Each structure stands twice: as C-alpha cells, then as structure tokens.
Amino acid sequence: MTRPLFFGPGEAVRSAAPGAVFVLGGDEGRHAATVRRLTTGERIDVSDGAGYRLRGLVSAVGAGTVELMVESAGQDPAPRHRLVLVQALAKGGRDEQAVEAATELGVDAVVPWHAERSIVRWRGDKEDKGRQKWTSLVAAASKQSRRSFVPTVHGVLDTPRLVAWASTVDRIVVLHEDAEVSLAEQVSELRISGALDVPTSTAVVVGPEGGISDTELARLRTAGASTARLGPHVLRSSSAGPAALVLLNHLLGRW
C-alpha cells in the first residue's frame, strides 16, 4: 500500500538525516495524529513540497505531533519536460475541478486566467482569496496523490499579461475546437525535429465556458502560441486541461 504523505517545513525536512527523528507538528501533525490516527510502526513520507522526501517509521504519536524515525532522505527527480496549465476562470467550480485533476496528473504549475468570456472574476480581495483557495487545493491534491512536488500557483493574469508571460515557457498550446492539427500530431512533429531532445516547458491554455475570443486567439498566436485539438469532441473547461495533460504525460515520456 502507498505510504501516506505529509508536508513539513522546508528547512526542517531538508536537514533531517537518516537515523534522525523528525517531529511533524502544526496542522499536518494534528491531521496525522488526530484525523489519520497514525500509530507507531506505520510507515509514512514527509516532503517539503519542493521534491525533498523523507521516508520512515512512526516512532511516537503525541497530542498533535508525530515523530518519524527517518530511514531515507533525498530529492525526488523533477520531470524532464515541464507542464503548465493556464486555466480560464469558470463558473460552477469547473476551474477548480480542472486544477485539482491537473495536480493529481502531475502538472508543475497552474496559471489562473481572466479570459474575456470568463464569468467568474477575481477582483480586489477576491484575487488573494482565489489564489489562496487554489494554493490550498493543489496542496491537498498533491498530498492525496502522494506527490512530493506541490505545483506553483501564479497570480491571476488577464490576456495582455498572459501574452507577456508566454515568453517564460518554450511553447504554449491553446486548445481549440477549430484547430486543424491534433495535440498528438504537434508533439510527434516536435519529436521528429529533435526539439524534445532537451528539457522543455509547455503551457496548455484552456478557455472558459464561452470559449476563447478571436481577439484573444490572435494575440496569443502573435506571442508564438499554436492551436491544437484533442479529438472529435468538445470538452468542458473542467476536463480539457486534464485530458491534454494525460496525453502529454504519455507522449513526453513522463509516464
């Protein structure tokens, strides 16, 4: 059975050596001790959220703390090809569904996007609250899927800022139902050209319920974005991104 994973403070996690006792406290310690009700002898993992993982045996359980006898410690390898999901804000929690699933599927970062046709808007205090909610969401999904890397959640971008941000990744692909080339075909072309022989970063852009406007699409293309379709059907905003990530994980050799 897969070991439960918990997150601890980065400096403390990275300073723990095999043979040492690591004390998991705070919210994670309380969850482990009182919700999960861990007992001595169980094996668990503790990560700093940036890929460093401790593996060990629970040696003691206190009131809101768990002591771990560290058996091994080290950095998990990061994927050679980095994946980013640019998710348009969407109503009905569909954007959150997409982000949660993307995290479980191994996305490395998520970017919330104020698309022209986004009904949901993060304005004023909602911006900080929205980002914090997504941050908590990816942390919980990482824990559930036993990921030692917690995806980065960027600040919300409108289209002009998204166009400027596009230069930070090697390629940006906009999922669009009218695209002539499939995502699989695009990746095959990249492999043939040798573009995947080196580490790369790819951002997948998913629009809101009403789709991406022609103006937005033109601006993104000017920034170097390509368009791609996934298959013969139109997917919801909540499922398009995760579907693309499954395909990319396979085609890029991440799985």
Image (cartoon, rainbow, N blue to C red):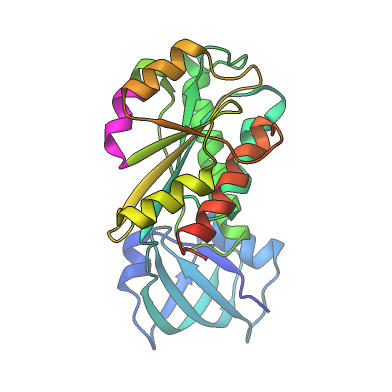
- Residue 64 placement (x, y as % from top left): 59, 63
- Residue 75 placement (x, y as % from top left): 35, 71
Residue at x 58% of width, y 13% of height: 117
Q: Is residue 25 rendered to the left or right of residue 195?
A: right
Q: Can residue 108 be seen in this view?
A: no
- Residue 28 placement (x, y as % from top left): 55, 59
Query: Observer-nearest residue: 194 or 131?
Result: 194
- Quarter of the image containing the N terminus? bottom right
Q: Is residue 212 visible?
A: yes
- As for residue 167 lying within the magenta part, the answer is yes
- Residue 239 placement (x, y as % from top left): 67, 39
Q: Is most of the magenta stretch helix, strand or loop?
A: helix
Residue at x 56% of width, y 28% of height: 176
Residue at x 35% of width, y 16% of height: 160
Which residues lie in the magenta part?
Answer: 162-170
Q: Is residue 52 rendered to the left or right of residue 6?
A: left
- As for residue 207 lying within the magenta part, the answer is no
Say which quarter of the image contains residue 182.
top right
Residue at x 50% of width, y 78% of height: 68
Say which quarter of the image contains residue 231.
top right
Q: How many labels does the image show?
A: 0
